[in-house]
Amino acid sequence: MSFKQYDRKTYIADLAGKFARRGMTKREFLRKSAMAGVGFSSFAASFLGGVRPFNGLTNLGTPLAMANTPDDVAAWLKDVGKPFAGTTIRYTSEATPPTNVASELKSEFEELTGINVEIEIVPLEQVLQKATLDAQGQLGTYDLYYLDQAWAALFSPDTINPRELYDSKPELAMPGYDWDDFSPPLVDGIAMAYGAQMGVPFDIPIAILMYRKDLYDKHGLAVPTTMAEYMEVTKALHEAEVGNGIYGTTGQLKSGHYSLECDWTIWLWAHGGSIFNKDQMFSGNDEQGMEGLRYMLELVDYMPADALTWTWDGQWQSMAQGIAAQCISWGEFFPGLDGGDSKVGGGLMEAAIPPEETSVRAPEDAGFNEIPHIGHQGGSSIALSKYSKNPDAAWLFMQWVTSKDVVARSSTVGGGASPVRLSAFKDERVLAAAKPGAGTTRHFPAIEWTINNRMGSEPDLPSWPEIANNVIPVRLGELLAGQFDSPEAAMEVIAKETDELAAPFRG
């Protein structure tokens, strides 16, 4: 490791530590991190200093949570683990659904192999600090890293390519692991850096359509398949039900919050726009971009007024309280609509693939590795540290925790979230959970199709979190509050500020 790389990681670790101690604001932390060349996917950045919403563990103590490890894999784990019995491996992560499930189920792996597993769950900024210090000093304190997709390039020199490891050490290769079982768009979007795989997909929040089936049936409406139909259905539901206190749709439009950027991006991408063009200049103000913005502004007319103050939590609550008829948002929140205190439980809600975009801009015509598509995603990966003191034992656990059996159970035990394997969508336990109730997987077909066909990914540049948290949603919030004379005026300001922040990374 060169001095320059060492110094950079020292700086990043110090920043993360200061922010964790609340010695600087989130905005300052994001800006200085960007200057150091490290970013966050904005889905992750929105939870800095806090905890990611989580529907809680479900189905524990039921057959849906029971292990279904193939006999040959169980026998292999018992045999291959013998040389490492008594070894302790360590992993640090934020509280994602798969990490919470791994913490709950790890005793199964420990009993089979004799390997002890310590999982440390901390806020995201502390995950970055711990991983950076570990890599910077080549300490090997942590054997496995949880990596936000925006960290792939930063940590790629510090991780072991799992595909190469699997092929080079056949004696440690789990039988039936099946690399082809991971969706190629997921691998490309969250587990690759510089053309090489540096981790394994672990978590995948993604936007899908959620709607009130009872209201669709009541008014003879069909699931919209185009953007024009989505607007028509929204209007029809609103006009028919607003007198009953039910709005056509709902939003996550809080000024200055990343959730507003998420909402805007969905409509931008759905109308053939992109955040950056192929020259890496802001393009949200071009013809397609303005069309997407006007579409979003029209939808606001059919939302509760409080949607302008809500993040995705408020948006979800409006659905759960039965005052919104449909929306396009994070699929991992669908299970909560089926259980708990939800007023639309019992199967009133349904999930569907997002409507087809009016047009789609090709990735090569966008900038900074942006992939325009309506299904906004915010995934992460798990990776093996190059400095692990127990790499073989850690590799066994990494394969186990991302195996077909554990991923499928993570999808049911983890509150109906994060099915990163194709087989998870067909697993008997996942299919058995596809019924109304907490932790349902009824929405998985929509998630699977969206991952494989309409998964959108934000730009990949260190200053993106600053842009997505402190520029776009601030100015859009001002537009929604009537502080700009026109949408064009707001986008002109966004373009200027975004291009200034992107300039150091252009080229």
Image: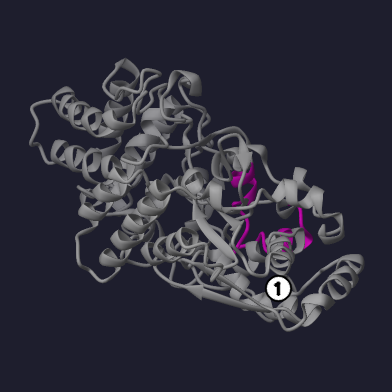
Secondary structure, mark 1, is: helix
The residue located at (82%, 76%) in the rendering is 83
241 and 251: which one is in front? 251
Q: Is residue 404 left or right of residue 32?
A: right
Give the tally of numbered discs. 1
Residue 260 belongs to the span the image colors magenta:
no
One can see residue 35 in this view: yes
User: What x and y, as percent, mark residue 345?
Assistant: 51, 64
The residue located at (24%, 28%) in the rendering is 499
User: What x and y, as percent, mark residue 160?
Assistant: 64, 52
165 and 226: which one is in front? 165
- The three-letter amino acid code for the residue at tag 1 is Ala
Residue 295 against residue 212 in the figure, above or below:
above
Residue 289 against residue 186 in the figure, above or below:
above
**Display colour scheme:** one colour
Residue 325 against residue 47 in the figure, above or below:
above
Q: Which residue is mark 1?
A: 65
User: What x and y, as percent, mark residue 420?
Assistant: 64, 51
234 and 358: which one is in front? 358
The residue located at (31%, 66%) in the rendering is 17
Q: Is residue 134 left or right of residue 125?
A: right
Residue 427 belongs to the span the image colors magenta:
yes
Q: Which residues are magenta?
A: 426-448
User: What x and y, as percent, mark residue 255?
Assistant: 20, 47
Quadrant for residue 303, please give it. top left
Q: Residues within 10 Å of mark 1 (few under 14, many from 20)?
A: many
Q: Is residue 38 left or right of residue 167?
A: left
For the view shown, which residue lies furthest in the front direction? 3
One can see residue 437 in this view: no
The residue located at (74%, 46%) in the rendering is 164
Quarter of the picture holding the C terminus:
top left
